[in-house]
Image (spheres, grey):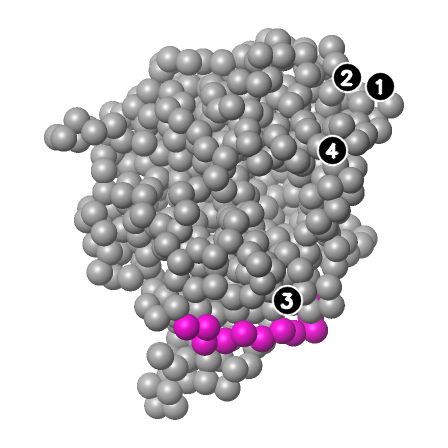
Amino acid sequence: MMGGLLKSSVFLAASCGLATSFAPHRSRRAYKPLPVSTQAPEQQQQQQAEETATNVNFEEWLADAPEEITKWKPCPIADGGNIPSYVEGTLIRNGGGIWTAPNNNDEFSHIFDGFAKIHSYKIHNSQVECQSRFLQGAWYKTFLEKDKQAFPTAIGTGPVLDSTNKEPKLGMIRTLQALINSATIFDNTPVNIWDYQPHMKESDSSNKIKTIAALTDAPPRTTIDFNTMDTISSSTINPLASGAKGYELMETAHPMYSQAKMAAVGGEGVDTYNVAVELGLQGPSVTVVRETSQGERSIVASIPSIDGTPYIHSYGMSANYAMIVLQPLRLDPSPDRLLELGFLRAMTHVDQTRIIVVELASGDVVLDKSIDEKVYFYHSISQAEIVNDQEGDGGVTSKRRRVGSGGTSCTGKFCDINCNLLDQSVEVDWKDEIEQGYELPVTRYSRSFGSECISEKHPRYVYAFGAFALGSKDYDNWGLFKFDLEENKVSSYYQQDSVYLSEPIFVPNPDGETEDDGVLLSQAYFGKESETKLLVFDGRNMEVMATVPTGMRAPLDFHGAWIPN
């Protein structure tokens, strides 16, 4: 075992629970199209962002968007814009698309439960084409079979409401249907996109079809044809992993590529790791799973969870270690309570946060410690292994986001969790110097593998969108921020009235000499024009390099992927 300090940066959530930290309440207003404008946005001054009640049509961003674009559609760049020539590939965004079935008074109460819809942007020779389409899994097809008049019943993130009185739809028969459907046909995957074959490009000499996968916080997976964006297949469970001893109940929506340097860029030996929750005869356990590009899955490590079934949305990983932070939340097994509240709001709290560090090569648990401090989070940002050659001391850091338990502290905060593998100590270090909250953070090195990785230090820059932008008192005042974690400040930002941005994706400049030399791609909803546009930012200063009007309205999405050509 390698001695040292493990530092992991984590994206933390609220001590009042995860349910209120990210997902805003969805508006019940019907969407009404407005005239579309292709005018490029201009930079807004900070004092404008501090004004209240200036943003419009935020609720449209959260409304049903049933329209689809099922063939690649050209999207001309607005006047004056330019996309650098090295930006060659496809951006795929994933999120919900429909939350209501008015004729049956069905209404999903949580933003995470909408029917999965992807929005794709193919960029070639500085030209853009787009698509927007629902994933055609069994769950969505059941909805279609009901003529879009009623939802299939299952255990969701939140309860299905009766839209006439906003009360959960309950009953013994409905509970039984929910349990059966959750195990047999539920395959809705609206959270993330993952490429399990990063070595395989769009064109392959063997004529094999390149595929990508849509994921959620559970085993269901949807396989998508990368060229056409057609749904190829979907599944309710994963293939049984070698070494598994029970039923795989959950798996995070945030897998990670092997960070080992031997996983060379372009090679076929790029493994994907993930963390799952397994239910067995001895109770729940947390498992680290390795999956090859050929789909072979195996258990690296299995750790019992003696105080209930944990909820894990993401984890940290570096070249040699995985760090799993079990926040003090446990799933409630009561079917009636799950149907009434949804699994997220039905979770119970325990008194401690548990930090587990697994050595990937051996599968050994090299640290397993519970601490009194309650650390709630959604997303891991980075992980680093720091070794002191003189003392044999070192560690790993994972940055996650945290929300305060009250007042106006309603969005993310940076935090380091430092694990010393030598003396088995754990330190939690909050970064209070940065006041701007944020959501869905990324770095240049997110999703990197092989020689592109860094494990010996954390990235300097983190990019994320944030509500309550620049001190505003309004949640719907959004901005996109570049955080400098060496100087602990917001170094630059983009903020426009009534522009609602999604998670950014960093595309590095292959000839760049600095960490921030590259572009950010962010799908944004322009509320004043009721139109979604793709924005291309300079990663060094957050200036808009290109604006790409789409002529469509894409609702709020969660995560996505950039698949380079």
Give the answer, above or below, for where 173 lies relative to 333.
Answer: above
Label count reads: 4
- Residue at image point 57% right, 58% down: 281
Q: Are the residues at dot 1 and dot 4 in contact (C-beta closer than 8 Å)?
A: no
Task: Give percent across and percent down for residue 159.
Answer: 74, 34
Measure the alpha-carbon separation of dots 1 and 2. Answer: 7 Å
Q: Which residue is mark 4?
A: 175
- Residue bearing the label numbered 2: 105
Give the magenta part as a residue range: 364-376
Q: Nearer the viewer, mark 4 or mark 2?
A: 4
Q: CA distance from mark 1 to mark 4?
A: 21 Å
The secondary structure that most of the magenta stretch takes on is strand
Q: Using residue 406 as the reference point, say whether residue 149 is left or right of it.
A: left
In space, the residues marked 4 and 2 are separated at their CA atoms by: 18 Å
Q: From where the camera sits, is residue 339 visible?
A: yes
Closer to the camera in the image, 171 or 488: 171
Name the spot of residue 103 as percent of width and height, x first.
Answer: 74, 10
For the point 79% across and 31% down, which residue is it?
A: 172
Badge 4: residue crowd in 10 Å (few <14, some 14–19, many ≥20): many
Real-space Cα separation, disc 3 to disc 2, in angstroms: 41 Å
Q: Amino acid at mark 1?
A: Thr
**Amino acid at the residue labelled 4:** Thr
